[in-house]
Image (cartoon, helix red, strand yellow):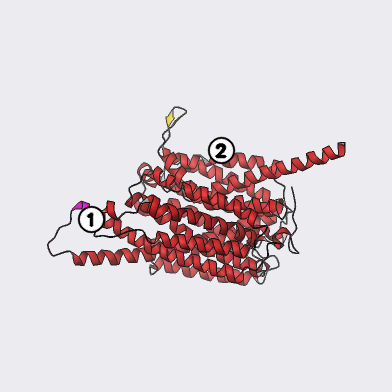
Amino acid sequence: MTDVASATSTGAGKKQHLGWALVLISVAQLMVVLDGTIVNIALPFIQTDLDITPENLTWVVTGYALAFGSLLLLGGRLGDLYGRRKIFMIGLVIFGVASLLGGLANSEATLLAARALQGLGAALASPAALALIATTFPAGPARNRAFAVYAAMSGVGAAVGLLLGGWLTGLSPEIFGTTVEGWRLTLLINTPIGIVTALLAPRFLSESESHPGELDLPGAVTGTLGLLGLVYGISRAGTDGWTDPWTLASLGAGLLLLATFLFIESRVEHPLLPTRVFANRTRAASYLAMFFAPAAMFAMFFYLSQYIQSVMGYSSIEAGVAFLPFCIGLVIAAGISSNLINRVDPRILAGVGTLMAAVALFGFSRIPHDTSLPIQDAAASYWTDLFPYILVMALGMGATFVPLTLTAVHHLRAEDSGIGSGVLNTMQQVGGALGLSLLATIASQTMDDLKATIAAAVPDGAQATPEQLATAGQQIFAAGASDAFLFGAGLMLLASLVTWIFLNVKHEELATDGPEGGVHIG
């Protein structure tokens, strides 16, 4: 009787242990993802308070994205070599301290440095978080549910960032007798969350084996700088064009360094990125699909959030609330997918999910933009023109992220789970940056063509009123956004094509750890 009670207590304790482990990992991932968008709404206030030029203001967002995207591979491998829990904790502490520095910044240089430091912390914590799921939760339903929660956090993070950013920016609380500007709260909120999560990690997360002395320094330098050049070049292309000299120089240097990186990796004994990570066809297909899918999803957030505010006239907090159905729908879809994945092959789930997302993006591309009508007649109605597609997009991405995240790290060797997670995160970041730049190019071209057409149709000597100019500007933006959504639908169809053709793992295999990796249950 005592043995039975003891066994029951042990089982309950392990389940509780795994539950808290998932809470810590999920909070960390949500914090890292939402920080990419939480400051967007606060940018005008930051610009005014710190006297930042319009040209440098974009670096508040870009600086974080550059550091995050370029350091992910290194962050993932450091977790494999020096212990994933340790790197996870270090990343969270760096993130928390950097957030404090950013929130207290009184100059442009301090804020930009803090944002880059946040990117470093995120690049250390995010791959370790995904790897900790793969090595902490047993294969089967428990791991599938954990991946569903992780995927939901990754998917809703951008929307939560917009909502939270809009709310916090509107606050001006008094702390220790001093009034704190709302934009500072978008950064300061991370500090207690990051530090507390790091302190709790040793209690609920087990440490992995470490392999110090095996760090591939030449690969780390060339790989990091190569990704930095590539991500910067792609980001710059979205604002300065693909023919800009600095864009071309950055892209060229990035590609050259990445080619050098691949050459080094094929020669060294302990490569930063072992080629065996890509040897599995299903895993490689997952990486490729997760390159295209976020690129399309970023289009929704970037252009739809602007359309809702600039054309439909929503306030920043109302725009954030408009994305709540996406958050709720994605969480529901992720939960359903975590159960279906035990009975349905990943190819079917992710294939249907990407097709749903493509349909949603096509629906967004139909937003009205008739320049012959007053804006109140031409603007979309939220409930009829946007809400149905926001919901379909959420359900589609929930059905996509869960199986693809599972298959991306499935059957990896235990010692490669960190770098495998780093590759997945890198594909998402680089894919998102490239997709957004391509979409920005397409949207800008459409806007320029429409401006020229409208200008040519205006009779000589005619003078447009400010209201007419504002209306035309809003509808021109809507036309560009609709073309961007249409291109995004094409990218999502590419993700779907890759999924249907190459993702051949069966759902029964996901319940096993396979020959390449074992699971350590902490």
Q: Is residue 266 positioned above or below 198 on the image?
A: below
Give percent across and percent down for residue 26. 60, 47
Callout 2 environment at 10 Å: few (<14), some (14 to 19), or many (20+)? Answer: some
Give the residues drawn in magenta, as a range: 459-469
Q: Residue 469, which numbered label?
A: 1
Residue that extends furthest to the top in the rendered view of this protein: 177
Q: Residue 192, which numbered label?
A: 2
Between residues 353 and 234, which one lies in front from this camera angle?
353
Between residues 515 and 128, which one lies in front from this camera angle?
515
Could one spot residue 336 in this view of the protein?
A: yes
Q: Earlier in the sequence, mark 2 or mark 1?
A: 2
Query: Looking at the picture, which amino acid does disc 1 mark?
Result: Leu
Numbered disc in front, either 2 or 1: 1
SS under mark 2? helix
Give percent across and percent down for residue 412. 69, 62
Give percent across and percent down for residue 161. 48, 47
Q: Residue at x 23, y 64 (%)?
A: 454
